[in-house]
């Protein structure tokens, strides 16, 4: 995997911290929570997409694709967080409650579980690959 520079690592960590702050603030119904979560998600996802794997392992490539899916889910969570604020889509109230309101929590949960799984597995697969060399 390509290593990130110190600046990129800082952006990556700040993005993760902003996502945590934004998600936590939304639990307290803070109106500014999506405006903190979304830039954090953009920073986190963009830095994660800069990490590339060009090796021969099919398993690591598969895990990277799963990680990219979780990155997309993080961005969808940010969009749904904005949509959950004041029904900006103009839907009737029952449709809004059924399909949009607070659904960002589900996509964020799925993304977090996928991130944890792929991060752990990629680390162990890279260790196996390093031992073979």
Image: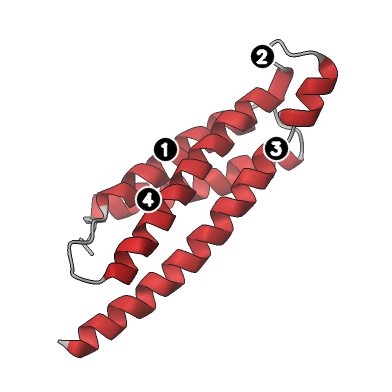
Q: CA distance from mark 2 to mark 1?
A: 21 Å
**Sequence order check, earlier mark of 3 and 1:** 1
Point out residue 16 in the picture as x, y percentages from the top left corner. 48, 50
Mark 2 closeness class: few <14, some 14–19, many ≥20 residues within 10 Å:
few
Helix, strand or loop for disc 1? helix
Residue 28 appears left or right of 60: right
Q: CA distance from mark 3 to mark 4?
A: 25 Å
Q: CA distance from mark 3 to mark 2?
A: 15 Å
Look at the image and tell me in which quarter the N terminus lies: bottom left
- Judging by the rendered image, the residue that carries numbered circle 1 is 42
Residue at 26% in and 55% down:
51
- Judging by the rendered image, the residue that carries numbered circle 2 is 88
Point out residue 48 in the picture as x, y percentages from the top left corner. 34, 51
- Judging by the rendered image, the residue that carries numbered circle 3 is 103
Point out residue 34 in the picture as x, y percentages from the top left corner. 59, 31
- Judging by the rendered image, the residue that carries numbered circle 4 is 12
Residue 6 appears left or right of 77: left
Does the residue at mark 4 contact the one at mark 1 (Cβ under 8 Å)? no
Q: CA distance from mark 2 to mark 4?
A: 30 Å
Helix, strand or loop for disc 4? helix
Residue at 52% in and 59% down:
114
Mark 3 closeness class: few <14, some 14–19, many ≥20 residues within 10 Å:
some
């Amino acid at each position: 995997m390509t290593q990130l520079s110190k600046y990129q690592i800082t952006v990556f960590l700040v993005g993760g911290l902003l996502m945590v702050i934004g998600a936590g603030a939304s639990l307290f119904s803070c109106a500014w929570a999506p405006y903190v979560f979304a830039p954090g998600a953009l920073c986190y996802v963009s830095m994660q997409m800069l990490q590339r794997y060009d090796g021969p392992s099919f398993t690591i490539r598969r895990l990277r694709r799963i990680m990219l899916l979780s990155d997309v889910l993080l961005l969808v969570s940010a969009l749904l967080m904005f949509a959950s604020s004041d029904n900006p889509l103009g839907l009737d109230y029952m449709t809004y409650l059924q399909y949009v309101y607070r659904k960002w929590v589900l996509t964020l949960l799925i993304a977090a579980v996928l991130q944890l799984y792929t991060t752990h597995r990629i680390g162990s697969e890279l260790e196996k690959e390093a031992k073979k060399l």
